[in-house]
Image (spheres, helix red, strand yellow):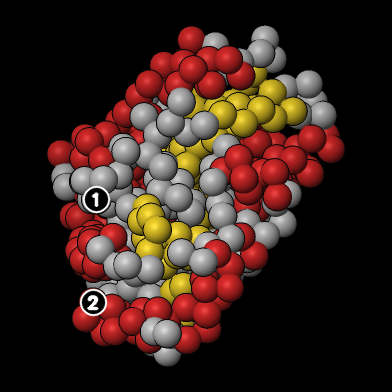
Amino acid sequence: MADLDYSKLHPDTLAVRAGTERTHFGEHSDAMFLTSSFVVGSAEEAMLKFTGQVPGFIYSRFTNPTVSAFEERLAAMEGAERAVATASGMSAIMSLCLAHLRAGDHIVASSVLFGSTMQFFNNYMAKFGVEVTYASPVDLAEWHAAIKPNTKLFFLETPSNPLIDVADIRAIADIAHGAGAILAVDNCFCSPALQQPLKHGADIVVHSATKYIDGQGRVLGGAVVGSNALIEPVYLFLRTAGPTLSPFNAWVLLKGLETLGIRMKAHSENAMQLATWLEAHPKVAKVYYSGLQSHPQHALAERQQSGHGGVVSFDVKGGKDVAWRVIDRVQLMSRTANLGDVRTTISHPATTSHGRLTQEARNRAGIGDGLIRISVGLEHVGDLIADLERGFAD
């Protein structure tokens, strides 16, 4: 693949073919390099590799062929120059922030984010002198108003977790760049199969590869993707601090990428059918899914994404008691807060993924006690509907 122009290939092709690292055995499938270090032929060669004067693998904390293959493949799918893989999605966000921010800097972040992301900003970046201001993902005026002279990073998820808000990446990128800041986009819900934020003006893409990129709930992983200039500081941080993706997990994620495109199409189709059914249900107050015509950013999602993904959230009438009853009664869906799996999962965000947020923060984000989030898997959608009917039954 080294002589091919990745930019001319479809992401589905890149998911299968990009980043292949073959040994002298000529294996067809990607090899797994389970080694902590690599042997050199001489002291001089070791010096040249350690100082970066010649390329090569040294130590699996920061150089490993299997991890490199995953990084190259993911970067190609996002249309980026480079990716750095990390041990989890949260370690990707940590690596991004600690590589690019210092005490006295300021973040403008979406007010609707994964709970752990907000906890990291509020409790840990703040601890080291980095302040954060939150803005509505869909109100550009709030992003403008939040800018300070020390603003260095804009951070958003689109679609957001768990309310599927769709932010205008191009418009927010323009605001960030006008302030001299960079824009990072968490692309977890769409993956590069459905959305490529760099093409819409974002500077960096962050992934929890644990979710759709793996797709079967097997391993943890993350990545930071962007230009060489922006990713090199992240790589240097990872080389020193070591929140590293293991070669085994990288190999599993490589296999996940190979089926990502076809899985995301199937997830989206199932989710659309389930969301349509939920919207007509008398016990549902509101459905959050960008594929629905009723979604306030439906037109934007149609322009920005090639599909709407597999996560559907909805408010039930009756609040927490009814929401918990629905969750407790289902028999097919898995009661877990993970998402992106071939198996459908169901959760109550207010008491799980976003439970550590204050009530005020949940109110600001619109996460009510009656909200249920479903990550729609690849089961037959008729069986999923029947399972929810058990939950809704009087």
For disc 1, the neighbor class at 10 Å (few under 14, some 14 to 19, many from 20) is: some
Q: Nearer the viewer, residue 68 or 314?
A: 314
Q: Amino acid at mark 1?
A: Leu
Q: Name the spot of residue 217 as percent of width and height, x first.
A: 46, 74
Q: Position of residue 329 (x, y in %)?
A: 47, 86
Q: Mark 2 highlights which residue?
A: 381
Residue 265 is drawn in which quadrant? bottom left
Q: Earlier in the sequence, mark 1 or mark 2?
A: 1
Identity of the residue drawn at 70% across and 50% down: 359
Q: Which mark is residue 292?
A: 1
- x 33%, y 73%: residue: 377
> With respect to residue 216, does 234 lie above or below?
above
Q: Amino acid at mark 2?
A: Val
In-front residue for pair 265/65: 265
Q: Position of residue 26 (x, y in %)?
A: 28, 70
* Quarter of the view holding residue 302: top left
> Image quadrant for the C terminus?
bottom left
Given residues 56 and 67, the one toward you in this image is: 67
Position of residue 386 relative to residue 304, above or below, is below
Q: Is residue 48 above or below residue 348?
A: above
Residue in view at x 23 percent, y 77 percent: 381
- Element under disc 1: loop
Q: 53 or 133: which is nearer to us?
A: 133
**Label 2: element kind:** helix
Q: How many marks?
A: 2
Q: Are marks 1 and 2 in contact (CB under 8 Å)?
A: no
| Residue at 63%, 48% in the rendered image | 362
User: From what the image shows, is residue 373 above or below residue 330?
Assistant: above
In the rendered image, is residue 112 in sight? yes
Separation (CA) of disc 1 from disc 2: 17 Å
Left or right of residue 137: residue 304 = left
Q: Position of residue 314 (x, y in %)?
A: 41, 60
